[in-house]
Amino acid sequence: MDGYLFPLTVEGNWSNSLSKCMKNKLQVYFLSKNKSSGGDCLVNYEDHSSTTATVYFNSDKIRENVLARDNHEITVKNEIVKLRVSCLEKYPEEASSLSVGAASNVLSDVSAETLDPRPGESIHGDEGAVMDSPQSSAVVLERLPELMSKEMLTLLVENISNLEENNYTLEIISETKTAVLTFNNPNGKALLNVIC
């Protein structure tokens, strides 16, 4: 795949029972700047009997940021999986056959209009200054795709707002295809609304 020319090898201590969900978990983890120092990437993990995957980044700087981070670990089904990352010097041939995974497609389906405030919830004053909202510090996200996982939505919120996961709580209501973001600090809601 064009543009993803900077690979890393990722090795972990995950069990065979976790193998089926590891590709998506690795994708979410390495897409997150806050969690892994990563960014735009693709994950190649097809051999589920292996505990090694390859992550391809579209920038050498992003790959170097990931390598510079001391500790990489993810939680999968209540198990902590420690990851070891190392640099691949040569670009493997299979990278040309990679396709963008489901994670990227799901994220592209949620538009900024989904995050727009409702009428009467504007946070802009007469002169465009951000004002404190008299309402709670919660935001309702509507029209979510049916397959939107909590991890994908967390990644989307993190990338839009630059807030870490411990700065808000997220509840997905699958029956109504909505989610409720409740911020620990009301400024989080203002930041999200200003960006969207």
Image (spheres, rainbow, N blue to C red):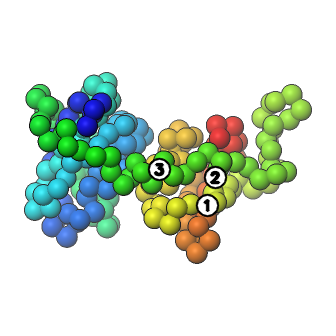
The tag on residue 107 is 3
Residue pointed to by mark 1: 143
Give the residue drawn at x 14%, y 31%. Answer: 91
Do the numbered discs 3 and 1 sit on residues whose CB atoms are within 8 Å?
Answer: no
Dot 2: element: helix
Tell which of 55 and 139 is nearer to you: 55
Residue pointed to by mark 2: 114
Examine the rendered structure and indicate whether residue 142 appears above or below residue 52.
Answer: below
User: Which residue in the rendered view is the most extreme toward the top?
Assistant: 61
Sequence-wise first label, 1 or 2: 2
- The picture places residue 112, in percent across and down from the top left corner, at 61, 45
Q: What residue type is labelled 2?
A: Thr
Q: Is residue 85 visible in this depiction of the protein?
A: no
Give the residue drawn at x 65%, y 41%. Answer: 196
- The picture places residue 62, in percent across and down from the top left corner, at 32, 29
Q: Is residue 84 left or right of residue 165?
A: left
Give the residue drawn at x 65%, y 48%. Answer: 113
